[in-house]
Image (spheres, rainbow, N blue to C red):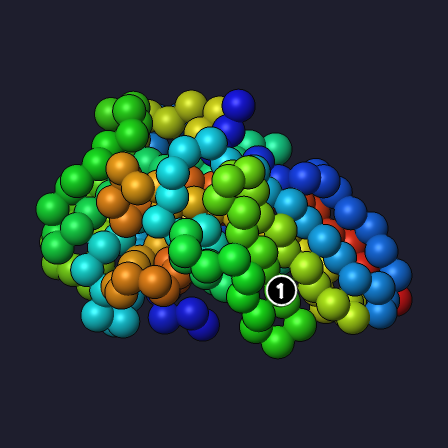
Amino acid sequence: ETGVTQTPRHLVMGMTNKKSLKCEQHLGHNAMYWYKQSAKKPLELMFVYNFKEQTENNSVPSRFSPECPNSSHLFLHLHTLQPEDSALYLCASYGAPLYGYTFGSGTRLTVV
Amino acid sequence: SQQGEEDPQALSIQEGENATMNCSYKTSINNLQWYRQNSGRGLVHLILIRSNEREKHSGRLRVTLDTSKKSSSLLITASRAADTASYFCATDEETSGSRLTFGEGTQLTVNP
């Protein structure tokens, strides 16, 4: 365990379903991120939260809706996804200058 | 093309050999980081090198940074089968705050 926990580890959903991904950290970090990792592509930054406030939305479609109720929890709400949204979704947190990000193990999402 | 491009895309070596991976980037950076990812899992932070540093060591890892050439290299000495993974460089750009941009990665295979 890295200190960043993502649930579920795997998710299969239909295009009309609504589901949520959860990320939790108790490292005391103030910044949290959602990244998307698709096959043969670099990690794509989706959203950035600093002190619970969204500071970046990297042109992500509205079918992805993030929520950060407190500095320890981050959610990604999913609805009416497309098959091309199938990917590994990674959550990361960051707390101190000159240290790296701490990543969760990811949620492997398959949209059918 | 991408910030943080790794070279080669794939590398296969025998146990005990050294592995060298390279990364090029385009903009001015605060620091450059290397991460490792085992298949389908989250990324693990390996080492961070600041823009005013030229070389850094951590165990069997050696990282160099040449800001004039906008390039970095990661050397893994005396490789082991357990080093088999994907390795990513990530840049913390001067203008981006605490947001990392990742390259596409190098897939390293160490054969027993």
Q: Nearer the viewer, residue A94 or B66?
A: B66
Instruction: Look at the picture and state if A108 lies above or below B111.
Output: above
Which amino acid is tagged 1?
Arg
Residue A89 on image: x %, y %: 42, 44
Q: Residue at x 35, y 55 (%)?
A: A92
Residue A78 on image: x %, y %: 30, 36
Q: Residue at x 63, y 67 (%)?
A: B61
Residue projecting furthest to the bottom: B59
Residue A65 on image: x %, y %: 23, 35
> Which residue corresponds to mark 1?
B62
Instruction: Look at the picture and state if A52 lies above or below A29.
Output: above
Mark yes or no: residue A36 visible.
no
Q: Is residue B66 left or right of residue A67?
A: right
Quadrant of the image occupied by residue B50: bottom left
Quadrant of the image occupied by residue A73: bottom left
Mark yes or no: residue B3 visible.
yes
Residue A66 on image: x %, y %: 22, 41
